[in-house]
Image (cartoon, rainbow, N blue to C red):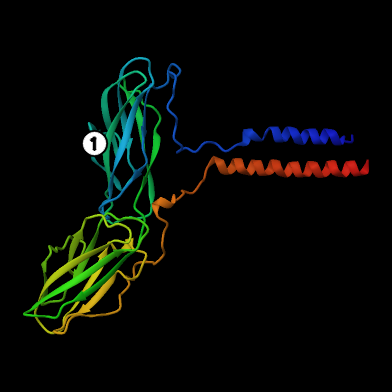
Amino acid sequence: MTTHPLRAGAAVAVALLALPALAPAASAHAPTPNPTTAPPAGTPTVIARADHVFLKGDPWHPSAPLEAAVINQGTSAARGSFVLRLPAGVGLASGEDCRADAAAARTWVCGGAEVPAGGRRTYRLRLTATAAEPVFGVQAWGSVAGRDAAGVTDRPTDFRIDWPDRTSLRLRATATPIVDGKVTLTARVTNTGAFSIGGYALNVVTPDGVRVTGPACSDSGRMDGAGCEIPRPDVLGEDATDTVRVRLAVSGDAPTVRLFLAPTNRYTNEDTSVTLRLTADGGSTASPSADPNRTATPTPSAAGGTELPRTGPAGAAYALVGAALLALGAGLLLLRRRLVRG
């Protein structure tokens, strides 16, 4: 039986009307709006939500506050707590009424105070990075879930944790002449990146016969006995320069001292290390040496809105939409041919 052109066009139109059903599913990490009415009977009435966390500060162990809200969707006041789960590499530094859950790793139960009907109670916690080595430019996910006084627990809701991005920091240094066995090094550290940083360390590597007399410089355990570390914990803004004067006691002829910025895997530029030869005429500066373990590839700052890869149900839905559009094209082509023949 021959298909009438108008029937073919109608079939295509019906296919198009079905397209909204193929729209991508909502992301699992999308924020859930607060309900305005009481939930159906049998569903949890105590839920929890948490804000996005941006770790900052100490580059080895950055930290940041986490605000978690316990929300009572019921029609009467109720005690409510929340279950906090954190990914590997992140720990709970401080929190209100939080206690470890003995039944689950990296899990805490927090809160428990009464929440009025339709109201919320906010808890302020502090998270910190706990990895042995510093990490930059990555994200991870934690979750919170509301729990009522009877132990009924809502499904977990995810929140994102961002580590600081890699950036660039430039080091320049000079040395005074050796006078009475004493030398002063002047190091100038300039933030050449696109955002402020929460501190850094100036590391000093000295040979036998040379020691740092000031400021405080100690082996933090990260130098393996090869030198000492001067922590600079203050925030260094974009384009700002931090000047550090390092005093040395020197014995021997023309010793060589190396300065470099740490943590070394944080910086995208090469000029983060300077070698000085100390003499009676002043220190001569060798060309800045690059850390062989660092790749000089800049990464976008967090302010640039780095996107996570999009995977999951949305990809399949887009494929179905493409197939429907292909069918539309074929139907229109068939309609055109039959009209021409007619």
Quadrant where the N terminus sits is top right
- Look at label 1 and name its amino acid: Gly
Quarter-wise, where is residue 114 in the image?
Answer: top left
Q: Is residue 150 above or below residue 135?
A: above
Q: Is residue 99 above or below residue 293?
A: above
Q: Is residue 1 above or below residue 72?
A: below
Q: Secondary structure at mark 1?
A: loop
* Residue 48 placement, left or right of 184: right
Residue 183 x, y percent position in the rendering: 12, 76
Q: Dot 1: within a 10 Å radius of its alpha carbon, few (fewer than 14), some, or many (20 or more) residues?
A: some
Quarter-wise, where is residue 154 in the image?
Answer: top left
Camera sees residue 105: no
Quarter-wise, where is residue 12 in the image?
Answer: top right
- Asked whether 280 or 207 is in front, the reply is 280
Camera sees residue 330: yes
Kindly identify which residue carries mark 1: 95
- Asked whether 131 or 235 is in front, the reply is 235
User: What is the count of numbered marks?
Assistant: 1
Most distant residue in the right direction: 342
Residue 282 x, y percent position in the rendering: 17, 81
